[in-house]
Amino acid sequence: MAEAEQESLDDLPPSAKLVFKVLEYNGPLTQKGIVKESMLSARTVRYALERLEGIDVVDEDVYFADARQNLYQLTDDAPNTHPAEGDADEAEACCAE
């Protein structure tokens, strides 16, 4: 059965959004690193990563320092949710209104 609408980041639970932000600000991390940075339980992080992988915003790779773990990072297609340095004036102008 085909879905009528594609799920987006806005549709995900807050825990998945937090994991997205942790990866956005810290770069690639293992699941343990995400647990430490987000202060979420390991089970919640696993669920959030599944949901993020389901909408193709997170990639899973082998962590070469310890092959028992995986390294998670945002895909190139992941939405950029914070403005670049050049867009700082635009962000300030929009928020000053």
Image (spheres, rainbow, N blue to C red):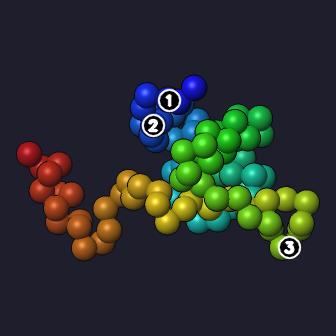
Q: Identity of the amino acid at label 1?
A: Glu
- Disc 2: which residue: 6
Quarter holding the C terminus is top left
Q: Residue drawn 89% across and 67% down?
A: 66
- Disc 3: which residue: 65
| Looking at the image, residue 33 lies above or below residue 9 | below
Is any part of residue 96 visible from this angle?
A: yes
Q: Residue drawn 30% across and 72% down?
A: 85
* 10 Å crowding of disc 3: few (<14), some (14-19), many (20+): few
Quarter holding the N terminus is top right
For label 3, the SS is: loop
- Disc 1: which residue: 3
Q: Identity of the amino acid at label 2?
A: Gln
For label 2, the SS is: loop
Q: Tell us which disc is closer to us: 2 or 3.
A: 2
In x, y percent, where is residue 19?
Answer: 59, 46
Residue 97 in the figure: left or right of residue 45: left
Residue 35 in the figure: left or right of residue 75: right
Q: Tell us which disc is closer to us: 2 or 1.
A: 1
Decide which of tag 2 and tag 3 comes sooner along the chain. Answer: 2
Q: Identity of the amino acid at label 3?
A: Ala
Decide which of tag 1 and tag 3 comes sooner along the chain. Answer: 1
The label on residue 78 is: none
Quick check: marks 2 and 1 in contact, CB under 8 Å? yes
- Quarter of the rendering containing residue 68: bottom right
* 10 Å crowding of disc 1: few (<14), some (14-19), many (20+): few
